[in-house]
Structure formats: structure tokens, C-alpha cells
Image (cartoon, rainbow, N blue to C red):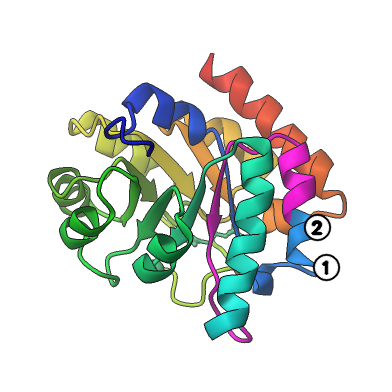
Amino acid sequence: GGGSGRIEAARMRQLLRTYLVIGSTNCCIEPLRVLEEALAGGVTLVQFREKGPGALTGAPLRELAVQLQGACRQRGVPFLVNDDVELALAIGADGVHVGQEDEAAVRVRARIGDRILGVSAHTLAEAEAAVRHGADYLGIGPIYPTASKADAKAPQGPGILRELRACGIALPLVGIGGITIESAGEIIRAGADGIAVISAITQAADVREAATRFVAGSIAESS
Ligand code: TZP
Ligand code: MG
């Protein structure tokens, strides 16, 4: 943002290294506390994704978004909103992430200007369309089975990342779905710039330590 144009690919790749996706339904304790711990552990990008049974709506949704955004601002970490362009614009979020079932990426780009636009893609055709429609990065997955998304497609394995790279997709990519500290390295070696995680961080016994380990792993793989 800041009127300085679209985010550069190199900067986007850095932000994707350890990408936390978080909503109240993913957290066993207060979401703000979980986020603060994850930020202290060094997560590089945050997406607010309020989905599933018990998800907040209306004023409480917006209040939580503002609260989480505040924690990200304190740490200088960009804050993206899943799916809800209205909310993202209302609170001045740094960007939006949309899936294939959400508002078309090309329309979202028109609405959000130079803010960060992430798009979920599951096939080469979807990836190519998202690139044309102005995505800054693509979310690829689920890579492994996940319990965090009710309507998740079949897991594709890390091979999908290798395939997309081999077919010429050069945009920053992040893998998502069932990723653990043990599998993070293999995702990056397959061609992703980073890993996006819900449960392995939000539901860790020690959130800060889990985040720290993902961060250390992704730096080791990317450099
Ligand atoms: N999109 C594809 S898989 C997924 C989303 C939002 C859920 C990832 O959660 P987890 O707990 O890291 O498997
Ligand atoms: Mg969505």
C-alpha cells in the first residue's frame, strides 16, 4: 500500500515464508493471544480467516479483525483478510485472499487497488487465470490432508508445486494444507516460497515456539 504501487515479487516471497492463517474458530484460547505469540515467534504474514461453525459475523467480526490488525501493525507484519473485501476495505487491511468460489480475482483487484491480492489455485488453468487477473501470490493446496477446512479439495501433494513451476508459473507461491514443521522443507524444495499454516501454529501447545521453528526452517530452506 502507501501509494507506492503493487508489491514487488521479491518482497512478496519474503512475506510468504511463514504465513499464519487465523480465525477465532482455530484457537483454543483468545485469538489475540495466539496471534501475539505467533508474531513474537516471527511469522511474516497474517491472514484473518473467520470461517466454520461458530464463526463471528457483524460487529464482533469487525472488532476481532481490528484487534488482530493492531497486533500485526505493532510488529510491522502485513494483515490480509480472507474473502471479505468489504471488511478489508473498511479496516484498511493490507490485502485480501480469495478462493475460486469467492468474488472473481479480477473484480477484487479493481476494488482493492494496489493492496496485496492472494488467490487460491488448484490447477494450472486456475493459476494462469489468477496471474492474468492480477494476483500477487497464489495459495496452492491442500498439499496434505487438513482438518481446518470443511470443504477442502483432495490433497495434491507437493508435486503440484513442482508442476506449476515446470509449466512456467513464476508468481510467488505458498503451499497450504496439513503442513507441519517436518514437511515444511519439502514444500519449499518443491517450489513454494513459503508455507501457510493454521493448526500447526494456532493449536500448538507452545504457539511461539512452533512459529519460531517454522520461521527458522523456512529461512534455512530459502537462503
Ligand atoms: N486452504 C486449503 S487447506 C486450508 C485452507 C484454508 C487449511 C489449512 O489449515 P491447516 O490446519 O494448516 O491444515
Ligand atoms: Mg474463500
The image quarter containing residue 96 is: bottom left
Q: Closer to the camera, 178 or 223? A: 223
Whether the residues at callouts 2 and 1 have beta carbons within 8 Å, the answer is: yes
How would you rate the neighbour count of disc 2 (Cα within 10 Å): few for under 14, some for 14-19, many for 20 or more?
Answer: some
Most distant residue in the right direction: 205
Q: Relative to 185, is 89 on the left or the right? A: left
In percent of width and height, residue 89 lies at 38, 61
Q: Quadrant of the C terminus?
A: top right
Total tally of numbered discs in the picture: 2
Q: Is the C-beta of the residue carrying label 2 under 8 Å from the nearest atom of ligand 1?
A: no
Q: Is residue 174 above or below residue 92?
A: above
* Residue bearing the label numbered 2: 33
Q: Is residue 106 above or below residue 147?
A: above
Residue under the image location 61 percent in, 40 percent down: 183
Q: Looking at the picture, which amino acid does disc 2 mark?
A: Arg
Q: Relative to 85, is 78 on the left or the right? A: right
Magenta region: which residues? 35-54
Residue under the image location 67 percent in, 71 percent down: 24
Residue under the image location 61 percent in, 35 percent down: 76
Residue under the image location 34 percent in, 32 percent down: 7
The quarter of the picture showing ligand 2: bottom left
In percent of width and height, residue 185 lies at 58, 30
The image quarter containing residue 33 is: bottom right
How would you rate the neighbour count of disc 1 (Cα within 10 Å): few for under 14, some for 14-19, many for 20 or more?
Answer: few
Q: Looking at the picture, which amino acid does disc 1 mark?
A: Ile
Q: Dot 1: what SS?
A: loop
Q: Is residue 82 above or below residue 44?
A: below
Question: Does the magenta-highlighted stretch encompass residue 179?
Answer: no
* Residue bearing the label numbered 1: 29
